[in-house]
Amino acid sequence: MNQFDTNLLWLIPALPFAGFLLNGTLGRKLPRAAVTAIALLFTLAPALIVANLWIVMKAAGAPLSLSVTGGPWIAVSGFTVPFAFTVDHLTLIMLGVVTGVGFLIHLYSAGYMAHEDGYWRFFAYLNLFMFFMLVLVLSANFLLLFVGWEGVGLASYLLIGFYFKKDSAANAGKKAFIVNRIGDFGFLLAMFLIIVHFGTLNFADVFAKVPSVAAPFTAIALLLFVGAAGKSAQIPLYIWLPDAMEGPTPVSALIHAATMVTAGVYMMARCHAIIDLSPTAMAVIACLGAATALMAATIGLVQHDIKRVLAYSTVSQLGYMVLACGVGAYSAGIFHLMTHAFFKALLFLSAGSVIHSLSGEQDMRVMGGLRTKIPVTFWCMTAGVFAIAGMPLLSGFFSKDEILYQAYISPSPVGKLVWLVGVITALLTSFYMFRLWFKTFFGAPRFDEHALGGHGHEDLAPVHAHKDKHATMVAEHEPSHGHGGVHESPLVMTLPLMILAVLSVIGGIVGVPTAFGGHNEFEHFLDPVFAGKVEALAGSGGTAITLSTIATLCFVLGLFAAYLFYFKNPDRASQLAAKVKPLYSLLDHKYWVDEIYGAVIVTPLLMFSRLFLGGLVEGAAVQGSAAGLAGGARGLGWLVRRIQSGNIRSYAGWLAFGAALFLVFTLVISYSLHF
Amino acid sequence: MNLDHSILTILLLTPLAGAAVLALLPEREGSKTHAAVALVVTLLTFLFTLHLPWHFDYAAAPGTFQFEKNLPWIATPAIHYHVGVDGLSMWLIVLAGFLAPIGVLASWKAVNKRERLFYTLFLLQQVAMIGVFISLDTFLYYGFWELSLIPMTLLIATFGRTENRRRAAIKFFLYAFIPSAILLVGMLWLYARTGTFDLPKLTALAAAHAISPNNHALWLCSLAFLVAFAVKVPVFPLHGWLSENIQEAPTAAVMVLAGKLGLYSILRFSFGIFPEQSHAVAPLMLALGAIGIVYGSLMALVQNDLKKLAAFSTLAHVSFVILGIFTFTVAGLDGGTFQILNESLAGAALFVLMGLLYERYGSYDMRDYGGLAVRHPWMVTMFLITTFAAIGLPMLNGFVGEFLILSGTMQSYVMHHVLWTVIATTGVILSASYMLWMIQRVFYGPLGLRAEEVKGWDLTAREHLELWPFAALFLILGVASPYWMKAIDTYGTIVATKPDTMAPGEIKHIETETYRTTGTAFMDPALGAAAQGKPTPPVNKGARY
């Protein structure tokens, strides 16, 4: 099995694209079963190729990277960008996450979206997303990465705005794309600088030349970070991600938690050779990552919408990954990216299952007591909550600890600071996740079971037409759940939950650090990519144990506090909120960031365009001079008419007219130059 | 039979003969004879244009013309029928051929009276456009340039949408005509100095600094050329005629109203005859390009009228081309020329689509719309594809052009190029903003007022036929750009400044020299006279053509 035809790499993204084309053009007329089959098959097949690839590249003596180059995409004299893919160990991990988690979410969607209008459209977009995401991680140059980068933005735009009849959904889709474009602005400028200084955009060539070229590395690194901040929702561009929750829940799980939003982290890890050269840029990246982690976590404390809590939690966790890149702990960042993909996909899908069971209710204030009603979802979500909160030995514990440990021992001047912020964030994370857990699953039910008419969910709100159909269908599958009750989701939805739950629990094993008797396999797997940075930073086992103990304390404290506030005495939380009203209001309004951006950037820009540009420049200057020109020319026109009425035929007339002008013209010039 | 030497003449004569036939055909109420004949003629012309890429010789020496024909026409003054094609003009001719049948299809239903006049003028317009692209004799070129004004003016004046059409047509004519008169003066001056109207000869003379020892006269002459072209493009702030005429003109005319002719003429004539002056004026043009991008985008952002939005988006897109070509880098020139194709295609598709909305609902006001995606799934799909092509989504055509232009600007040696790169790159944010907002206002959210009153329908077969070629080209041009670029590149490489032939110190010297010439010398004769004593700055050492 040591042979792998590299041409198969083309197939990895091509298959989902074929699925997109099939469902996109014919889907409307196909039965739902056929649409599902196409969508699932064209996602499963690349997953199998990736599995094969994994086996080949894990084999002893296997090549460290495989590449394949096709024809040129853009070619002008002196600058060519080919279609080229390359797979190294970093790509391999990303491929595994994207195709694996991607397939599970496709499977889940088949159940979740079963009764939606535009079922075919949903799966066409989902496959399109897979295509672009796979291009992104496979690309061997900056520009093809950018293709995937923009492409996933397109898919995200289409999927967030899936319920385009809702203004909020249409707004959120547009906002996501535009804010991402702000990031792309930085990414593009970084690429232009790279072209100027390196003359190429191929990863291998650029990174090979890095030591010998004097380029403005700080500028390039910071511009790349602007790109990453857009895609990975970091300060100051994180504002689109919470709104993106307007999309169907599987989309939130796939795009806005597990895969697309991690593209920025992937990109920074990919470009580590450039970023490493600028301590300034690294410090900025680490600080902004830490600030994002903390800020999002504080907002997450007070959200009531279950998906919004998870959205802010995603922003916060992405902050950890960016922080890791900022202190040079790329493999720790990628490790967390992977475990996060497991537990956050799990959390979103479980939340979807909760929402599904409550006919579209997303507000945690009217949940509660669901533990016994939807036990499978409960247990799966429990695994996810404990994993993200950092319960020792679960996946999130190992990956988050690794980041904090690396930050603590890193030589970066901000290393200790971001470690401290990271620890505080860990405490908050544990608290708000258990808050979610208690409010949703424990206590007395706060919803009116009889009021839950159909079996729709949030996504059905604008299309009530199929509620009845849905109910009938669910009744067929699950006769024990009568019409109108809270019900567990079908197997097609719970099976992916269970698989992800297992991964969330044991996923950290691949990265157990040496201090815990492990081999840090994950990081060694990435050594060829990051050139053994880990060894260079190795600290003592004692430090690792101490830091882990602190992290464990955070977990316990968060759990205990949430227990006190949301289980023992549920009123205590609102009493506390009333006591610190200004602070609560600040968090509740998300620090007013959207409003500030609106007042400081959007409104002034629109007013400037409308009044100054539209009124003064366009209205007065441009059109005014046009009117003056017209007035002046009317006289000229009169003159021309006179000439024409004088029976001078057209082009001879022009010649005479022109010759006269010509005479004047040359005379003026001659005189002015004293000829 | 070898068509190579007569193909360009055939390209001119086919639509011309078509126009003659249409003018003679009697007009009958309700018959589509004229439209059908126009469709056949334009399709035939398009077919003939495809001969060019089919037989183009990519190995030909750079700067030479192909499919050339040079016949003396008038002895004194020496005017020749000299036509030819190179990598710059080839795809523009094919583009003109491609757009014409779609223009006819788009007018099929929209134009239902005075069809004889409409289609005759339409074909004459095409003759003029092809003539402009193939003429290598400046006088011949001028004839076609002026010819292009008349049918367009009449089309707007006769078939304009509102009562405002005559005013708009007059504005268009004056805007185009006055600078053209000055252009003619410039051409005649050149003739007086050199005794030739022949472009290749003039280019060779310019490269040898043999046109005139009088720098000021050359300067004025180059400005006469540049201003005439810049108005036609239009370059910010000379765009006063644009939005009104885009609002008025029928779809078929709007598709060819702005962009190509002026941009091509700058590349061919300004760069060809006045290389040094063009380099010297580059800092200004770079600034106008970058400002035009931002200005056009911001203005598009605050429009309520779809056609005005499209007008300002057109301004932003042609400004991209201006930015690219005045960088004098290979990437900028290639990308800019390629972007002429992209801008024309995406703009034309957008105008066709907006025309379809107007045919159904009788309004271009976005406030009348909303929620149409439910009713027109195909139309919204086409709108989205066009939008993403226009805002430069990678793998669609617009991205290749924009990326090359902006990366070229960053590589340029023109003054302040980094600043203008940064400013121009904000265009990618703004274009996404106004286009996606437009999509949202027309197609998403609850159903709008107008749509509640009027029952619209989704695309008909004819409309599919108009739009799918665009969609296909967006994708093909976006994925397989080298196929087009290899012709364009033969032109771009000879015009680009080659910094490797200059020492770094020299570059600096050019920049300051350039700036002084544009900034002050032109204004101050004494200083200019002093400057004349100095050796000519070594811009563009390589011989051209």
Image: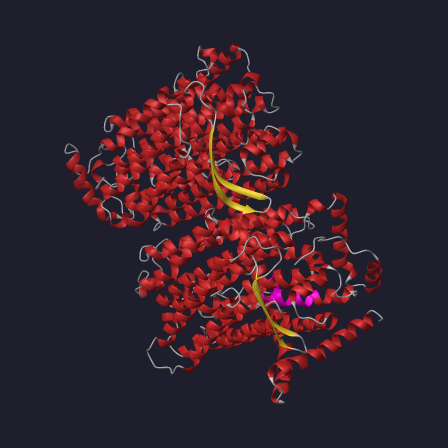
**Residue B26 locus on image (x, y percent):** 38, 83
Seen in the picture, residue B168 relative to A567 is either above or below; the reply is: below
Q: Quadrant of residue A45?
A: top left
Q: Magenta part mainly helix, strand or loop? A: helix
**Residue A294 locus on image (x, y percent):** 50, 29
Work out whether residue B12 or residue A142 is closer to the camera in this orientation and state it.
B12
Instruction: Check the image and tell me how it is coloured.
Output: secondary structure
| Residue interval drawn in magenta | B222-238
Seen in the picture, residue A520 relative to B377 is either above or below; the reply is: above
Total labels drawn? 0
Work out whether residue A592 or residue A284 is closer to the camera in this orientation and state it.
A284
Residue at screen point 24% across, 29% down? A374
Residue at the farthest bottom position: A646
Work out whether residue A231 or residue A592 is closer to the camera in this orientation and state it.
A231
Please indicate whether residue A617 sits to the left or right of residue B93 in the image.
right
Q: Confirm whether the magenta stretch covers residue A48.
A: no
**Residue B445 locus on image (x, y percent):** 36, 53
**Residue A484 locus on image (x, y percent):** 19, 38
Seen in the picture, residue A100 relative to B202 is either above or below; the reply is: above
Q: Confirm whether the magenta stretch covers residue B231.
A: yes
Please indicate whether residue A298 sits to the left or right of residue A571 in the image.
right
Residue at screen point 72% across, 62% down? B206
Q: Is residue B457 visible?
A: yes
Please indicate whether residue B514 sits to the left or right of residue B441 in the image.
right
Residue at screen point 32% across, 24% down? A501
Residue at the farthest front position: B1
Seen in the picture, residue A58 relative to B63 is either above or below; the reply is: above
